[in-house]
Amino acid sequence: MTCLPEIAPGQKKLGLVIDLDTCVGCQACATNCKEWNASGHSAPLPDLKPYSAGAEGVWFNRVHSFEAGEGEAGRTVHFPRSCLHCETPACVTVCPTGASYKRAEDGIVLVNADTCIGCGLCAWACPYGAREMDEDEGVMKKCTLCIDRIYNETIPEAQRQPACVLTCPTKARHFGDLGDPDSAVSRLVAERGGQPLMPELGYSPVNRYLPPRKRATPPAKPVEDAPTHMDVKNPLLRWVDRVLTRMPAMESERQV
Amino acid sequence: MNPAPSIVFFTTASGAGYGLLFWLGLLRPLGLVPGGQGFGLTALVLALVLVTAGLLSSTAHLGNPRRAWRAVSQWRSSWLSREGVAALATYVPAGIFGLALLTDRPGLAAAMGLLAAAGAVATVYCTGMIYASLPPIRQWHHPLVVPGYLVLSAFSGAALLAMLCGFWGDGVVAVVLALLGGGAALVLKRAYWRAIDAAPPEATVESATSLGFIGKVRPLEPPHTETNYLLREMGFRIARKHAARLRHITLLAGFAAPMLLALLALLLGGGLAAAALTLAAVLALGGLLVERWLMFAEATHTVTLYYSGN
């Protein structure tokens, strides 16, 4: 059913918190996402023309890089983009078949590949570009928040996290319940001022992005000493230095 | 947005078909179109052929056309589903309308014609709402989009009705409607284009990345070197180069020329009028194809903020 579930206060809202301060743009999260999900709940994630020009495929997570600000205040920020498991996702309500749905118990947004007709309307309705069409099967695919890992009792408990979170070498990705104000992720969001993306469109995204920290005031630049002839200790080289200093510069050298 | 030919054809053909069905169902009981069985059946068949061809074409857009029947299930939340329900439901009164015409039952024909007309309006309204209910695409999420679909459907339907009336030699009301429809379409589309050109984007690359507090945000490196589904579907850019010219073509060839031809038909009468009205209908439909193509090609989706920054 594509009507959204009623959301009670304090209800479980599983999602990701992504730290834009520590993300180094290494693409490990995107790669491990593809690796796990290529055989996971929404498998396969097909690649078109994988071994020739024009290679492309379905990915649930894509890492952009942006420049923000000018000059000294400017930053390069790496920015992983994936499904935000919104509280009011139009991608779900526009679905004509009920294939797209939001789980009442944890808020995860999923697609039922058996009933999806591949109309693509949900991808149009998602402001964040989180949905990509599997053009082999003709059905829509999207991030499942690794639903086949986080509840998977056959793997060690420490690994019951989304693949992107587990693999991040700088711990820039965090997974948890954003509906619980006392959870580790909620505290992180409160501490660091975690932000939603495009809140003005009214989708109430669950995922939060932690802003890059303010840079410490840069120290004064070290000043280089201006060398004198006497800094050259070797007498022969000191003489060469003098000669070279007095010699008129060549035409080509002046232009440089 | 990528103007998929199947969708462009669908909304143009079905829109015109529903427009024709609407005018036929509404005007026939009032005696404002030729009342004979031949005219009624011809107009009804033309309307249903256009509607059906459009609906079939729309399934070509689906990744899994064989599952298309599932699309009528979510009418509680989805405008696409509602459109499907309305489209299928409209076949019922339209079909009975046809049977009543065949068996010469004027009362039943009038009632079913009016019901079919209501169904046609509902279906086109749902079509417009599919686009108008998508916040990421500001050119579609606009109050003039639904009136646009309704008016253009009414205009193209009136142009077709005028053409048929021309052949039956009794077309003043339909021709006047086509004239009014063309005028309304012209005014509305111009207002719509002015509005979308002037409106500032709601979302920006700064709000899309939450990095606006640092300063202006520019994309530095894309996440992939080749294209992908998002860029092909949502990042379509070719048409914007020709947008101004295509808008002129729509206004002149699609709206103004059919109106001139309709005026000419009023003055000429007879066989020449039928020829002029046929040309007017063909031009109107051609203009609408261009308009519908532009409707997609000029629409921008917020996902492109992440790739191009605007």
Image (cartoon, rainbow, N blue to C red):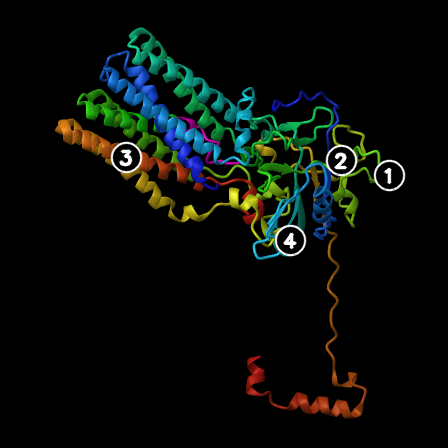
Q: Mark 4 points at which residue?
A: A74
Q: Is residue B193 left or right of residue A239?
A: left
Q: Which chain carries label 4?
A: A
Q: In the rendered structure, which disc, 2 or 1, sits on the residue that comes first in sequence?
A: 2
Based on the picture, tell me whether residue B144 belongs to the magenta stretch. yes
To the question of a shared chain for discs 1 and 4, the answer is yes
Q: Which range is magenta?
A: B136-147
Q: How far apart are marks 1 and 3 (CA)?
A: 68 Å
Q: Which mark is residue A148?
A: 2
Task: Measure how far apart labels 4 and 2 are at the Cα level.
Answer: 40 Å
Q: How far apart are marks 2 and 1 (CA)?
A: 13 Å
Q: Residue at x 36, y 28 (%)?
A: B50
- Amino acid carrying label 4: it is Gly
- Tell me the chain of label 2: A
Q: Do the residues labelled 4 and 3 touch (CB within 8 Å)?
A: no
Task: Say what amino acid the circle numbered 3 marks.
Answer: Val
Residue pointed to by mark 1: A156
Q: In which quarter of the image is residue A147?
A: top right
Q: What residue lies at 53% left-to-right and 25% top-to-bottom?
A: B69
Which circle marks residue B282 in the picture? 3
| Viewer can see residue B298 | no
